[in-house]
Amino acid sequence: MPTSSATTVRTLDGLKLSATVDQPDGPAQHAALLVHGAGVTREEGGFFTRIAAGLAEAGVASLRYDLPGHGESEGRQEDLTLSVVLNTIRAGRDALIEQTGVTSVSVLAASFSGGAALYYAAKRPDDVARLVLINPLIDYKQRFVDEKKAWEADYLNDRGAEQLREQGYVGHGPSFRLGRPMLNEVFWLQPRVVLGEITAPTLIVHGSEDTFISVESSRQAVQQLTCDHRFIELEGAQHGVAVHDDPEYADPQTQTWQAEVIEAIAQWLNGMAA
């Protein structure tokens, strides 16, 4: 039967990231690296746990890890940057290959990590066999700067500057801290401009009622992709492939949507159009 075991991913700059490896019953021919969103853990409220189990049943090994400053991993959220996330993808991929012996690796990323994952796929095409993006955040500057009241014409106002100076970060929701490095980086590192460079077959999943990251972002991304791709728009789904106000993913409709998405992901990673 499939197995699940704890492991550690060492980043390029020496942080230890808590991780979990899931392996199928028999030899795996393919593997997937799962990268979670901001302010959560590698389990994504249980969704990534179920994705990993579903992939193992389909013969796909996987590794998921807590980003720096998240879950049980070392590091501080306010030190996190997109470049850090990119390097954790590289380190996670290396660890996945070492743990499983499988060299054909796909990347699956949700929400905050989606834009970084697509950037990685565009810039290191030999590293990514297939790509899966779940309600991906692609336009970081828009989300972290343009949509925030503390920013005016690309400048942080005095109140925001004081908060950043005194505590070293500004809040983005109750569970994620944006530090000065990230706030500067998003002006320059913009994943949307490299969508056309991606060669890995790409699956994008997004809920039509997502109020955190508009589905329009993914609709536009699909138009910019030049690789083989598929777009699944879940009618009525909120962020996280769930009904509104269902953080525990307990609603039957949420569970139905997530089961459908897991099946589609497994088929996509195994080279079949779902």
Image (cartoon, rainbow, N blue to C red):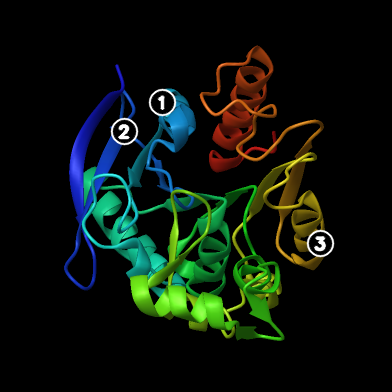
18 over 184 or under it: above or below: above
Q: Could you tell me which residue is drawn at 61 percent across and 77 percent down?
A: 190
Q: Earlier in the sequence, mark 2 or mark 3?
A: 2
- Cα distance in 3D space between marks 2 and 3: 34 Å
Are discs 1 and 2 less than 8 Å apart at CB? yes
Q: Amino acid at mark 2?
A: Asp
The residue that mark 1 highlights is 53
- Cα distance in 3D space between marks 3 and 1: 31 Å
Q: Residues within 10 Å of mark 1 (few under 14, many from 20)?
A: many
Q: Amino acid at mark 1?
A: Ala
> Quadrant location of residue 246?
top right
Q: Earlier in the sequence, mark 3 or mark 1?
A: 1
Residue 90 rendering spot, x and y as whole percentages = 35, 65
The residue that mark 3 highlights is 220
Q: Amino acid at mark 3?
A: Gln
Which label is found at residue 22? 2
Position of 262 compared to 70: left or right? right
